[in-house]
């Protein structure tokens, strides 16, 4: 599961001043229970009306049952720096950390 990889590497993200946030279309109580069950040290936000999912292209409509699984790396100015549409959950945290390292080298 992708979230476990981010959980297990959270110190690596924190040391780069990166904030990890998950978004799900599940209700807040379900997200809270899921976060607690897996001891995620980051927030899981609820997008029950799918407005965020539609805005970012993860859902085509408010009645889409399962939005796409998409990750976004957002820069300090609030701009989308990278879009990850198809990821391998086991590799994804390392992929994002590598991108953060690239940004550090450029900055």
Image: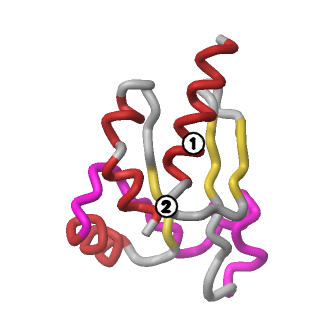
Where the N terminus falls, by quadrant? bottom left
Where the C terminus falls, by quadrant? top right
Q: Is residue 63 above or below residue 3?
A: below
Q: Secondary structure at mark 1?
A: helix
What stretch of residues is rendered in magenta?
A: 38-63
Residue sitting nearer the eye, 20 or 9: 9
Task: Where is residue 42? Give x, y as percent.
Answer: 34, 50
Q: Is residue 54 magenta?
A: yes
Q: Which of the 4 image quarters holds residue 71?
A: bottom right
- Is tag 1's residue or tag 2's residue first in the polypeptide sequence? 2
Task: Where is residue 39? Give x, y as percent.
Answer: 22, 60
Task: Where is residue 6? Give x, y as percent.
Answer: 40, 51
Judging by the rendered image, the residue that carries numbered circle 1 is 96
Judging by the rendered image, the residue that carries numbered circle 2 is 90
Residue sitting nearer the eye, 91 or 63: 91
Residue sitting nearer the eye, 58 or 90: 90
Name the residue located 33 percent from the left edge and 52 percent from the top edge: 7
1 on left or right of 35: right
Name the residue located 59 percent from the left edge and 64 percent from the top edge: 88
The dominant secondary structure in magenta is: loop
Q: Is residue 53 magenta?
A: yes
Task: Where is residue 74? Give x, y as percent.
Answer: 62, 38
Distance Cα–Cα, label 1 vs label 2: 12 Å
Coloured how? secondary structure
Residue sitting nearer the eye, 16 or 20: 16
């Amino acid at each position: 599961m992708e979230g476990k990889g981010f959980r297990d590497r959270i110190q690596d993200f924190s040391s780069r001043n990166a904030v990890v946030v998950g978004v799900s279309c599940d209700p807040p109580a379900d997200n809270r229970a899921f976060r607690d069950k897996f001891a995620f040290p980051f927030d899981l936000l609820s997008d029950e009306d799918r407005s965020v999912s539609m805005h970012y292209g993860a859902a085509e409509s408010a009645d889409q049952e399962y939005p796409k699984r998409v990750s976004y790396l957002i820069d300090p100015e609030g701009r989308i720096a990278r879009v990850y549409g198809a990821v391998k959950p086991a590799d994804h945290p390392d992929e994002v950390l590598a991108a953060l390292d690239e940004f550090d080298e450029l900055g």
